Image (spheres, rainbow, N blue to C red):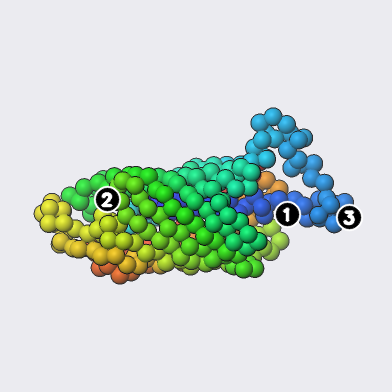
Amino acid sequence: MSSMMKNAGLIVLSALIVPLALRNTAKAADANALGGDSSEAVQPELDGERFGGLRGKLHDWEVVIGAGAMYAPKFEGSKDLKVVPVPFITATFYDFLHVTPMGLAVDVYKAENLTVSAKGGFDFGRDEDESPHLKGLGDIDGGGVLGGVISYELGPVEFKAEIDRNIGGSDGLTGKFGAEVSHMWGQFIFSAGAAATWADKKHMKSYFGVTPTQSARSGLATYDAGAGFKRVDLTASVTYLASENWFIRGQAELGILTGDARKSPIVQKDTQPSVMMFVGHKF
């Protein structure tokens, strides 16, 4: 479940860009209707004061709720895929506090194009019951995650570097470095990105190593996995802004395991495809 939950986290994080796009689309639509400049347009449909109470707060906090499904590997390195439903909710408070099902992020520094954030969350680990191939390897416990993110926007391109430290579970450290380019055309947002993930020895040993005891129980050869880049991910997505509040997003990803991860006897297939689709509503 761990790799699938991480993919779910990507859905949620990508959903955070949609409220801004919806807001900009609404401004443009109102401006056209009034025959004026979008910066001066009035938005009665999206005005939180008009709704009042809870609905007004949901608008102020840029709450997004939605549901969808993803088709992804059962575990990192699996040759088998399965469909999992993905409900989600996100919210942004005061433009610097972001809440997602995967955790919490706080923007600690923001410049014109640069944002530095601290984040916390939970890693679900890995259960040997996820696949017969994992029998005898034991479970990798879940644990807390603390980390940081630095992002820089250069026109339509966003560069991002993340670091995560697991507290419990693998007790490992991972870093992710990548870029994504987005283009808005009418009511569509097209995005494509690439990223590479590095992991320390603790993480690699937990998820890709096989100890002598695990080897005796599982039948897999012993394997000592070292630190290094473990995978490269390529993503592409299309978001359709159906209205001022509703959107539909489809995303495809191809993960390619590298280095010691690729050579692990736990890995059945080094290419890890996944597809996702979900519908969301922004208050």
User: Where is mark 1, residue-wise?
Assistant: 25
Dot 2: within a 10 Å radius of its alpha carbon, few (fewer than 14), some, or many (20 or more) residues? Answer: few
> Dividing the picture into quarters, in which one does residue 129 lie?
top left
Mark nearer the N terminus (2 vs 1): 1
Name the residue furthest right.
35
> Residue at point 37% right, 45% down?
144
Name which residue lies at 71% across and 50% down.
23
In the picture shown, does residue 62 fall above or below 33? Answer: above
Instruction: State the CA–CA distance, disc 2 to disc 1.
Output: 45 Å
Q: Amino acid at mark 2?
A: Ser
Give residue 215's position: percent from left, percent from top.
14, 56
Mark 3: which secondary structure? loop
Q: In this view of the protein, which residue sits in the foreground, 71 or 23?
A: 23
Q: Image point 32% across, 67% down: which residue?
A: 228
Depth check, mark 2 against mark 1: the one in front is 1
Quadrant (top left, top right, bottom left, bottom right) of the C terminus: top right
Q: CA distance from mark 3 to mark 1?
A: 15 Å
Say whether residue 249 is visible: no
Q: Which mark is residue 16?
A: none
The kind of residue tagged 3 is Gly
Q: Is residue 280 above or below residue 273?
A: above
Q: Amino acid at mark 1?
A: Thr
SS type, badge 2 = loop
Q: Which mark is residue 131?
A: 2
Q: Which residue corresponds to mark 3?
A: 35
Horizontally, residue 152 falls left or right of residue 57, namely: left
Residue 59, image x, y percentages? 67, 40
Q: Viewed as shown, does residue 44 lie left or right of 144?
A: right
Tell me the element at label 1: helix
Residue, x 78% and y 55% (percent of image)? 28
The reply, left or right, for residue 242 in relation to residue 197 is: right
Q: Residue furthest top?
A: 53
